[in-house]
Structure formats: structure tokens, C-alpha cells
Image (tube, rainbow, N blue to C red):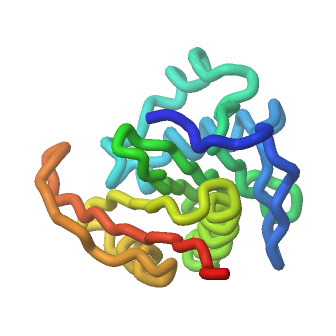
């Protein structure tokens, strides 16, 4: 996958009512380690990575690439949203949040903001999301964001759901 086309990266931070989406910074490293070593977060993403391995191998400023947004609440990293360009020309939405903030609507708010940015950068192009069907929380989030099922398939040892959200350029 490659990143969405953009005039400049990183873009200016995007603020919502409670969150800020911004580029990664060195101060986010500890939160990245916590995120990727979390058993809960890894449940539907192939498992948690060992904390010691992450501490030893993670760059000083992780997640520095186009399409990668750190999500902060009260100036503290709570998760990440990604918008990766797929080989078929669609953009794939991804998101991970620390378990301590689950159930507060942060993922919906952050993903909606990132999708707004994507719509402005790549108007009219499709956006997809792939979710393990066992991940009911993530399936509900996709529905709230407006994704509809385009197919189901078996991969990585589990049934996967692919949803699509197509943005259209308004007429006129």
C-alpha cells in the first residue's frame, strides 16, 4: 500500500470537538509501545507484539508517513488512524485505540475527521475498510461511519468483512 496523494505531509493538525489528529512526534513513542503490545488491541490484528521487542526496535518517532494520524485527547496520544492507498486505487481506513478509551466515541470522531481530510484530498475516490467479522465493536463503528458491505472472505485464519464508503464530488 502507498499513502494517499497530498500536496504536503504532514497536514496541519485537524481538531474535532474533543480530539486533535496530527503527525507523530517523539513523545508518542511510549503510547505506540502500549498500543502495539496490548493483548486487547491485538485480538483481531494478529496478536500483541512483545513489549521488549517493541522497545528495542521501534523508531524514536514511530508512524511518520503520509496517511498516518496520531489521535490525541487533552494533548495525550490515545490512538491512531491510517489512510493507506491500495494497489486498486482505493484508500483503506485503519484505526487502533488504547483500550482505556474504548466506548467513549473517540474512534468514531477521529475516523470521521480523517475521512473528511481524505474526501478533500481525494474527492470521489472509494474508501474501504477490512474488519474481522468477530470484531463486533469495529463492525458497529464501520456502520456508523457509513460503510456498507461489499464482500466477505476468509483470510488470516478468520472471516473478514470488506466495507466501502464512496465519496462523490457534488454536481455544480
In the picture, which quadrant includes the N terminus? top left
Relative to 83, residue 128 above or below = below
| Count of numbered circles in the view | 0
What is the x, y in percent for residue 10? 79, 40
Q: Which residue is at a point 64% across and 43% down the rendered structure image?
A: 68
Q: Which residue is at a point 63% across and 58% down the rendered structure image?
A: 118
In the picture, which quadrant includes the C terminus? bottom right
> Is 100 or 131 nearer to us in this picture?
131
State which quadrant residue 115 falls in. bottom right
Q: Which residue is at a point 61% across and 79% down the rendered structure image?
A: 170
State which quadrant residue 14 falls in. bottom right
What is the x, y in percent for residue 76? 81, 54
State which quadrant residue 137 falls in. bottom left
Relative to 34, residue 92 above or below = below
What is the x, y in percent for residue 54? 55, 25
**Quick check: 13 left or right of 163?**
right
**Quick check: 121 left or right of 131?**
right
Residue 148 seen from this side: yes
> Is 129 or 96 nearer to us in this picture?
129
Residue farthest to the front, as pictured: 172
**Quick check: 169 left or right of 90?**
right
Relative to 18, residue 23 above or below = above
What is the x, y in percent for residue 78? 69, 57
> Is 140 or 40 nearer to us in this picture?
140
Q: Which residue is at a point 36% across and 47% down the rendered structure image?
A: 45
Residue 101 seen from this side: no
Relative to 10, residue 51 above or below = above
Amino acid at each position: 500500500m502507498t499513502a494517499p496523494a497530498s500536496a504536503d505531509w504532514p497536514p496541519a493538525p485537524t481538531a474535532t470537538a474533543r480530539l486533535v489528529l496530527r503527525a507523530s512526534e517523539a513523545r508518542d513513542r511510549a503510547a505506540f509501545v502500549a498500543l502495539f503490545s496490548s493483548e486487547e488491541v491485538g485480538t483481531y490484528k494478529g496478536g500483541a507484539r512483545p513489549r521488549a521487542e517493541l522497545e528495542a526496535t521501534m523508531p524514536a518517532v514511530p508512524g511518520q508517513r503520509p496517511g498516518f494520524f496520531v489521535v490525541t485527547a487533552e494533548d495525550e496520544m490515545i490512538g491512531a488512524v491510517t489512510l493507506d492507498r491500495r494497489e486498486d486505487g482505493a484508500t483503506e481506513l485503519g484505526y487502533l485505540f488504547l483500550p482505556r478509551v474504548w466506548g467513549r466515541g473517540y474512534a468514531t470522531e477521529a475516523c470521521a475527521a480523517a475521512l473528511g481530510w481524505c474526501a478533500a484530498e481525494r474527492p470521489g475516490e472509494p474508501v474501504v475498510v477490512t474488519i474481522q467479522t468477530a470484531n463486533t465493536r469495529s463492525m458497529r463503528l464501520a456502520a456508523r461511519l457509513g460503510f456498507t458491505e461489499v464482500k466477505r472472505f476468509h483470510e488470516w485464519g478468520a472471516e473478514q468483512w470488506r466495507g466501502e464508503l464512496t465519496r462523490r464530488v457534488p454536481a455544480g
